[in-house]
Each structure stands twice: as C-alpha cells, then as structure tokens.
Amino acid sequence: MSSPTWNIPGGVEVIRADTMINTETFKGPCYLQVEGESILTRISDHPHEPLHINLDVPGTKTFPKYTTVITTGRVVDRTIPLVDINKRFANVIAQSAMWSSAGVGNMPPCLPNTRVEVLSVVMDWATNPNAKKFLWFSGPPLSGKSTISMTVAKALDTKGLLAAGFFFSSHILAKDLIPTLVYQIIQHRSLDALRQCTLSALRKELLAPTETMKRQLEKLLLEPLRQIPEEDRDEERKKLVIVIDALDECQGKSGGYFNPRVHREILETLVEATEDPAFPFRILVSGRPQMSTVRFFSTTGKDAALQVFLDRKYCPDADIDLYLKSKFADIRREYSDLPLDWPGEETVLHLVKRSAGLIGYAALTAMFIEYGTRSPVYQLSCLLGIRGATTTEEPFAFLDALYSRILSGPDGDSVFPSMWVSLIGLDLLKGLPAYFLDRFLELEPLDSVPCHGVLAPLLQIPQPGDTTTSYSMPLHSQALQEYLDNPSRCDPRFYSAVAERKEFLLDRYISVLKDKGPRRGMWATSLERDEFLKHFIPLVGHFELWISEMSPDKAYFKPEDYLACDVDWFMSILLEQLKDGSETAVVQAMFDNVHRGCKRRCDSACAHWRRSIVKACQDCNRAIPDAGRHRAEAQAVVA
C-alpha cells in the first residue's frame, strides 16, 4: 500500500527518510508517517500542536504553519516513538560530531584509486570475523587520517555495517562520546531489540552528564545488550563497526586543554567494551600517535588492538602524485586556456617532494592554486617561489611558509587583522556563528573584505546574511592553530600570545556590557540583539575566570568602566539565560572579581556592582553570593 501523501494538503513539506532526522532544523512542527498508514505522529518538541493527526478523518487537513511530514518505510515500535530517542538524549549528545552531521558529513572522501592499500587493510579488518575487535589507526599531522576515516565510514554505511561514527574536534568534550555513539547505534535497522532495552533503562533513570564514561557505557549499552533475549541476538550485529576519528583533538570532560588521563580513560573504556562477551561491535579509533596513546598501545592495549600507522609503507608519494594530477586536471577544465600538459610532470614531482608524505599539505597547495584571487598560473608561481627546506629539525618548514603566504594576502601585505586569525580558532569561540563573532570582535566581516578569497584554502566563510553558520577550517583546523600558537613557527605578523588574546577578548567583554550588546550600528532590531546575547552570555563564566587568574590582587577593569555598565540590565539577562546551575558560580566569580583591591570599604565601582548583583539574586530567588569566597573556589565557573 502506498503512502497516503495525497491526503496531505499543499504547502506542507513531505520528506522521505529511513533514518533519524534532527527535527530541530525545521521551522515548524514535524510529523512522522509510517508508509501505508494514515496516522501522523508529532516527533518534534511543539507541545501546543496535536500529537496525532488522522488523515482519514474529515476536517484534519488544516495543518499548523510550516509543518513538515517525514514518511518512512521503517516499522516503528509504537511503544517507543522516535521522539522519545531525541528527548532522552537531547542534552547529552554532540550532534556536530556525528559522521552524518552537516559539518563532518561534507568532508570529502579519498579520491578514487588513492590510499588503496591502507583502505584495503582497514576494510579487510572490518569484514574479517576472526580479526581483533579493536583497530588503532594513527599517523603524523596532515597524513590524511580523517579523510580515510570518513571514507571507511561511508563505505561501511553503504554496506549497512556502520553502527556509529564520531569525529572529534577541539570543541567536542569527552563526556559526549558514549551517549552520542549509543544514540546512533540504537537507531540501526538491525538493533530494534537493543533500542527498546536502552530506552527502557533511560525511562527508569536519566543519564547524568557527570557520570564516568565506563558507567555511561555500562548503563546505556552493556546492560541493555545483556538483557536482549537469546533469540533476538542476530549474528549480523557482530559485523557492525564503530568509527571514532581524531581522538587527539578530544577535549577534557569540561573543556580546556587536553588531559592525557582523559585520553587513556577513553581507550580503556573502549578496549574493555570489546572484551565484554555481550558487546558485538568492532571499533576503529584514529588519531595522532601522542605519548599517552603510544604508551597505552605498547602496554595495556597491545594485545587487544590491531595497529596501523600511516608511514612510507603505504606509499603516500604515489597517492599525492595522483591527487595533484587530478586537481590540476580539474583546474584545466575550468580554465580552458591552460595547456593540456600544465603544469608539467617536473612541477608535480617538485610539489610531491615538498609535501614530504603529508597529503594535507598537497591538498592545501591545490586549494591555494584553485581558489586564489589571481590566475592559477600566478598562484602556482607564488607557490613555487616559497622558500623553505623540510628537515628533521623543521618538518613543517614548507607548510609554515605556505600558511604565512596565504595569511599575507594576495600582494604579500596582510589585509587581515592578525588577532582575528588566532581568535576564531580558539576552543572557546569555535562553533559560534560567524555572524555573532563579527559583531562581538568588532572586526570587519570577512565577507565584506575584497580580498577575503585568499583565505579560501584555509577557511570556509558563510554567505552574507547567514546568521547560523560558523567559520570553519575543515582541512587544517588543528594544524593551523598549532602554527599560530608556536612563536618559533609562526610569522611574527600573525603571532599573538595567549595572554594577548585573553586581554583582547576581555576588552570586548566590558565593551558589550557598557553598550548593552554589540556596538550600535551592528544590530538593527531588538531581536538581533537578543540573538547576539544568547551566544554571548554562556561566555561570561570563562571571562570571569580569566579575570580572576590575570588580576588576583585588584579589579581588572578601571572603575570608570565598571561604573559605565548597567548592572541591573546585565544581571536580568544573565539570570534569565543561565538556568543550568552554572549561574551560582558565575555570579560568585563576578562578585569576587569586582571586589579585588578593595580595602576596608568598597570603592564606588564595587558598591555599584555588588548592590545590583545582590538585588538581582534576591528578585529572582537565586543564591546570594558569599562575600568570603576565594578564587580557588571559583574554579567551578566553567566546570
């Protein structure tokens, strides 16, 4: 029986999908229709709209505005609607880390006929029932690990063998790993019984974000797996693979710099899972060979994992040669006036040698030539003119020189604020909309800079008017940030110390407080200002922690700056938006920081702030800050 979409009125968007869709991306309510049935079930969080709509009942053709209907051929367990999955996992998963997310899913796979040998090794492992259940896949920076991981994930998904895919980046927290994996696993078409057991467990006890990874795995996956009746344990489950990429980019449980203990905890949790008789899946993990992982796989994980390292054994030069020739062929098709043999075999071999086995460098050179602001011939001549020599002591000499050339602008004199380049890569600001960052940093938006195209090899810049997309560096995020953070590698024009970046952001912080939002002229309506503040308020705790660290003996800002702030307004916004329990520590830090340096009596700036803080807390029935608290206790501001 065909889906009765004929009974759905015009103006309602109808989508066919057999996998989970993030309903938050739709403007209005979203309904699910199982093929052959006339009952629509609401799967989005719109409590004021009807939960069910019966297309066979007269008078039900009036749908709420902006309605979307998703039709599916999957058999849905009526006791566990898909909306339940979203609700149970809503606050404990990292949507942007999932392999099919908008950001990660756009990562290009390996070009045809490249990385053939290493892909064969990985896919043979994935499909060999007698192979070890854990694969550790590592290699140096820019060796193409993430591209290979994505290629493997897509190939496994095509075969129906991908259980879950998780791609770490520097703004993804370790605590999100297990819930996000389980969220994907229980939606696999062969794991209906597991889905029922997992959601049943979550109905009894919600997942606490503070639980250890081992406890998360036990509660969400291992215990439900053990509860599945023997007759429902399909052997096909043993063929499913979990792919986890870029472990080295993983942040700690609360953000901040990477903690090797967290790295080890992740690996121990995953390896122990593969050793549990109830756990049927295989796990592939990729990342740089950092000291913590090298030590783990030479001791605890030595016998548990197959280890693959991307070195010269896998012929990277041949792959880079093929990659560059493919890219140059694309450029010749776009520029028909180029000779058919351009740029010539000798030039390609020279670029292969420069790449030193790093396909990420080759990709950057190709993008520099293809997306530069001048002709490909001119861009190539600039590239060949870059001086440097890759040695054991300076393995990234050519890469660093290319970064400097790109950031210098088309004529060699930078048109981009050097501080801006460093700031957008900060973990604190990653993932925030470019629209917000332009207004917060008060630097000229890149889409209005005439020469912004020169950054195309490094940066994806949202289109004008896009208020949700962030700046992103899909190929070189970590490698570029390491260049910018290292004074011995970075061009002095683009280097800024961590303290300088914090000082700049704190200056922007107090400016926003004084202006009650972005500077006048950078927002047109109160709705735009509210949207700005929605992204700004969660940063306040970080700023106040920095203040306590950078100015332990006196107030950080000048008294006239503090006095210029409308604290009543600011506190009302802050307490309205922070309702996750963090507001107590944030307010306490503000209360402490403004008081630093006061002797027997508070100065006028301190009194101005403290009176308003106390009054706001009283009015909102929130905890009043303790005047005796010390800085050490304020560390929980961003925990």
Image: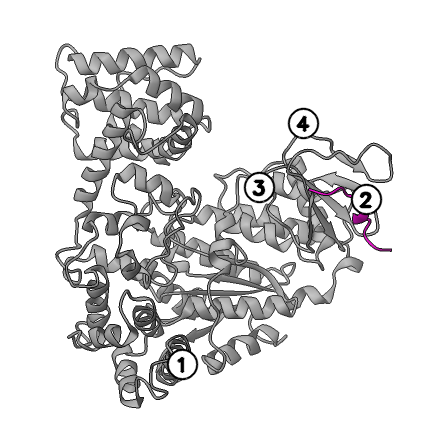
Badge 1 or badge 4: first in the primary sequence: 4
Residue drawn at point x = 27 percent, y = 20 percent? 591
**Where, quadrant-wise, is the N terminus in this rendering?**
bottom right
Q: Amino acid at mark 1?
A: Ala
Residue drawn at point x = 73 percent, y = 50 percent? 71
Residue drawn at point x = 57 percent, y = 62 percent? 275
- The Cα atoms of the two marked residues, 4 and 3, are separated by 16 Å
**Where, quadrant-wise, is the C terminus in this rendering?**
top left
Residue drawn at point x = 33 percent, y = 50 percent? 447
Magenta run includes residue 4: yes
- The Cα atoms of the two marked residues, 1 and 4, are separated by 56 Å
Badge 2 or badge 1: first in the primary sequence: 2
Q: Are marks 4 and 2 in contact (CB under 8 Å)?
A: no
User: Residue 98 appears at what percent x and percent y?
Assistant: 52, 54
Q: Amino acid at mark 2?
A: Asn
Magenta run includes residue 266: no
> Residue 329 got which mark?
1
Badge 4 or badge 3: first in the primary sequence: 3
Q: In the rendered structure, which segment of residues is drawn in magenta? A: 1-11
Tell me: 52 left or right of 278: right
Q: Tell which of 543 and 527 is nearer to you.
A: 527
Q: Tell which of 280 and 502 is nearer to you.
A: 502
Q: Which residue is mark 2?
A: 7
Q: Amino acid at mark 4?
A: His
Height in image: 619 above or below 475? above
Q: Which residue is mark 3?
A: 24
Binning the other alpha carbons within 10 Å of mark 4 as few (below 14), some (14 to 19) or many (20 upward) gives: few
Tell me: 77 left or right of 244: right
Badge 3 or badge 2: first in the primary sequence: 2
> Residue 48 got which mark?
4
Q: Are marks 2 and 1 in contact (CB under 8 Å)?
A: no
Q: Are marks 3 and 1 in contact (CB under 8 Å)?
A: no
